[in-house]
Amino acid sequence: MIEVLYFAWVRERIGLPRETVDTNAATVADLVIELKAREDRYAAAFTDLSALRVAVDQKLADFDAPLAGAREIAFFPPMTGG
């Protein structure tokens, strides 16, 4: 089980701020594939991965990051300065 958090427009498209997911995904990208297959709202949220950032256990990561031992994954849009 892994805790998945959604922020900003990702949360709006999916309709949840967080959920616990039972997955056998080896990487973040594998998890995204599983999530996209669930429903259209997930597919809409993960259509363009270049518009998303991911953190694994609160550390920025790439989509090819391994999930072994991870407890939390967060998806959010890129941050802008200002």
Image (cartoon, rainbow, N blue to C red):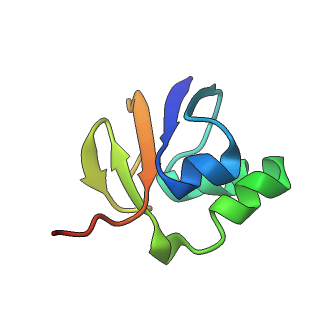
Observer able to see residue 58: yes
Residue at 44% x, 61% y: name it. 63
Observer able to see residue 31: no
> In the image, 39: left or right of 6?
right
Identify the image quadrant of residue 61. bottom left
Percent x, y of residue 53: 39, 61
Query: In which quadrant will I find the N terminus?
Result: top right
Query: In which quadrant will I find the C terminus?
Result: bottom left
In front of the other: 27 or 10: 10
Residue at 84% x, 50% y: name it. 39
Percent x, y of residue 43: 74, 61
Q: Residue furthest right?
A: 39
> In the image, 42: left or right of 18?
right
Q: Residue furthest front?
A: 82
Percent x, y of residue 8: 48, 52
Residue at 58% x, 75% y: name it. 48
> In the image, 63: left or right of 43?
left
Image: 78 above or below 34: below
In front of the other: 76 or 68: 76
In front of the other: 69 or 61: 61
Image: 35 above or below 45: above
Identify the image quadrant of residue 58. top left
Percent x, y of residue 47: 66, 71
| Numbered-mark total | 0
